[in-house]
Amino acid sequence: MSSELIKRIFTSVILLIITLYILIYFKEDYFLYFTIAVGIICYAEWLLTNDALLKKFSKGFIPDVIVFLTNKSFYKYFSIYLFGFIYFLILLPLSAFYLRVEVSLSFLLFILLICIFSDVGGYVFGKNIGGKKLTKISPNKTRSGSIGSFIFSIFPIIIINLLNIEHIQIELNFTNILFSLFISLMCQLGDLFFSYFKRLNNKKNTGTLLPGHGGLLDRIDGLIIVLPIVYLIKIFGIY
């Protein structure tokens, strides 16, 4: 086992323990502060990841306000800041807080488990089976890894039902299986979305905060996309 893999596993375990402790034992207001702090870190990593694009877009800007606002680069430059601000500092904390407080802690834990298992499935299948690349956006992603993510995403429902976990009541039925597969798909799309921007900026990772993983955004990129989507699903009563 490589030292990089050992660091990756160790970091994942520690991060999971901390996350579960915060989810279960933090009071509502402290949990909100925690999600905002996570959002701030992700926003900072988002800007650092896109620093090359930001510098490129800002070239040629001049003080004249009218010309500045009509420069197409301005909107590209501004959109990176605006997207990050709205998504990481508003949508992400709001979604996590709503799912934990207004829906239930058990449901948020269920979403978290799906994302974790989906990520593990992609890693296990991708490393051990390999095969054709999934897309040029992320050369390390394979079709077998994607299939592994879908397969593993169903495991939380099976485990919850086999162990008959009292505080997490999720029935093993077609609807919940379909929901798990959908969450896995969103996780994978989230991973590809951030991989695309890393590739544009010739970056391997969004940061160095987590040994073996890179930045926090590298570790939770799929979950970041999933939470606001599940929030909307719950708001509109789709699931």
Image (spheres, rainbow, N blue to C red):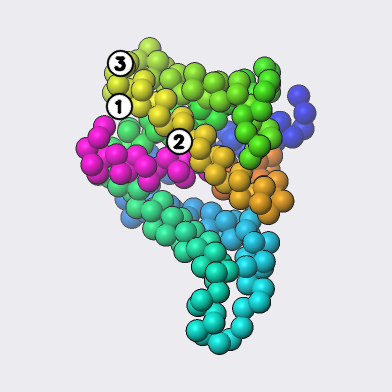
Q: Position of residue 204 (x, y in %)?
A: 70, 46
Q: Nearer the viewer, residue 80 or 153?
A: 80
Q: Nearer the viewer, mark 3 or mark 1?
A: 3
* Circle 2 Cα neighbour tier, 10 Å, few/some/many (<14 / 14–19 / ≥20): many
Rendered-image quadrant of the C terminus: top left
Q: Which residue in the protein does label 3 denote?
A: 173
Q: Are marks 1 and 2 in contact (CB under 8 Å)?
A: no
Q: Is residue 141 left or right of residue 89?
A: right
Q: Is residue 31 left or right of residue 193?
A: left
At 67% across and 73% down in the image, what residue appears? 59
At 68% across and 61% down in the image, what residue appears? 52
Q: Mark 2 falls on what kind of element?
A: helix
In the current view of this chain or complex, which residue is farthest to the bottom?
Answer: 64
Q: Are marks 3 and 1 in contact (CB under 8 Å)?
A: no
Q: Are marks 2 and 3 in contact (CB under 8 Å)?
A: no
Q: Mark 3 falls on what kind of element?
A: loop
Q: Which residue in the protein does label 1 denote?
A: 167
Chain-order first, disc 1 or disc 2: 1
Q: Position of residue 110 (x, y in %)?
A: 38, 30
Q: Picture quarter containing residue 24?
A: top left
Q: Picture quarter containing residue 236?
A: top left
Q: Nearer the viewer, mark 2 or mark 3?
A: 2
At 35% across and 48% down in the image, what residue appears? 95
* Circle 1 Cα neighbour tier, 10 Å, few/some/many (<14 / 14–19 / ≥20): few
Give the extent of the magenta segment.
221-239
Distance Cα–Cα, label 3 vs label 1: 18 Å
The kind of residue tagged 3 is Asn
Residue 3 part of the magenta segment: no
Q: Is residue 207 left or right of residue 157?
A: right
Rendered-image quadrant of the N terminus: top right
Q: Which residue in the protein does label 2 denote?
A: 186
Q: Main secondary structure of the magenta part?
A: helix
